[in-house]
Amino acid sequence: MSDTMPPVDQDDIEWAYYLWNSLSIGKGRWVLPGVGAYLRTGDKELTLTEIHFDRPFVDELGASVFNKHHWIMVLADNINWTIKEEVIIAFDGEEELLIPDQLIGHVSVCAERCGAVFRVEAAEPSGVYVKISDGLECPCCGKALAIEPDLKGVHVVVDDKGYLLKQERIQEEE
């Protein structure tokens, strides 16, 4: 666990025990601000079903979404609970991530051949997703109409490794 999160103490353990045990199985929902929503899915089980972020960020204490989620997992271990991850919905700020099931696994490249690769992947707590704009601008090179129309408005994972290698080569040539 990161040094940015405090160690789990007795008050945390008691709080989790009473809160989580009070949630009804299958319907009891608990929202952890800045992380997401957990649903009580079993006798001693919570499942992260929503994520409430579009890309990793660090709060004023230096803790990321992932630090907070991991802290909850450590807390659960202390009271013999299990935390699962089965994200059903994810949000980009206030906007729901658009990741159509029929496009999952789809791979595309920038039409301007800048080296960017776009993949449609299922939402995961550790994922970083970029929304393809209405103008179909490449998030790497910024050229308009550089992305296929099927990806308009879709949240994708951007692999910018090729773009960065190309930029490095251009810098060396100058």
Image (cartoon, grey):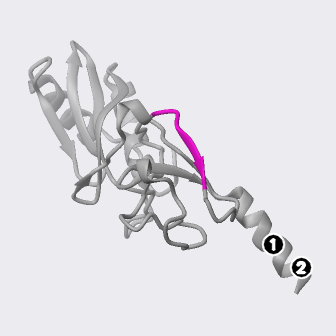
The magenta stretch is 104-109
How far separated are the C-alphas under marks 2 and 1? 6 Å
13 sits left or right of 174 in the view: left
Which SS class for mark 2?
helix
Say which element carries label 1: helix
Residue 6 visible in the displayed image: no
| Between 84 and 104, the one nearer to me in the picture | 104
Q: Which residue corresponds to the image point at 14% horizontal and 23% vertical from the top-left?
A: 21
State the count of labels. 2
Rendered location of residue 3, percent (x, y): 52, 54
Label 2 Cα neighbours within 10 Å, binned few <14 / some 14-19 / many ≥20: few
Q: Is residue 13 above or below residue 1?
A: above
Q: Is residue 124 above or below residue 94?
A: above
Q: Nearer the viewer, residue 31 or 132?
A: 132
Image position, residue 106 (x, y; %): 52, 37
Q: Please report contact status of discs 2 and 1: CB closer than 8 Å, yes or no.
A: yes
Q: Residue at x 73, y 58 (%)?
A: 162
Judge from the rendering whether residue 61 lies leftward or rightward of residue 172; answer left or right. Answer: left
- Judging depth in this view, the residue of 91 and 147 nearest the camera is 147
Q: Position of residue 6 (x, y in %)?
A: 40, 52
Q: Which residue is mark 2?
A: 172
Residue 168 tag number: 1
Residue type, label 1: Glu
Q: Residue at x 61, y 59 (%)?
A: 110
Residue 126 visible (yes or no): yes
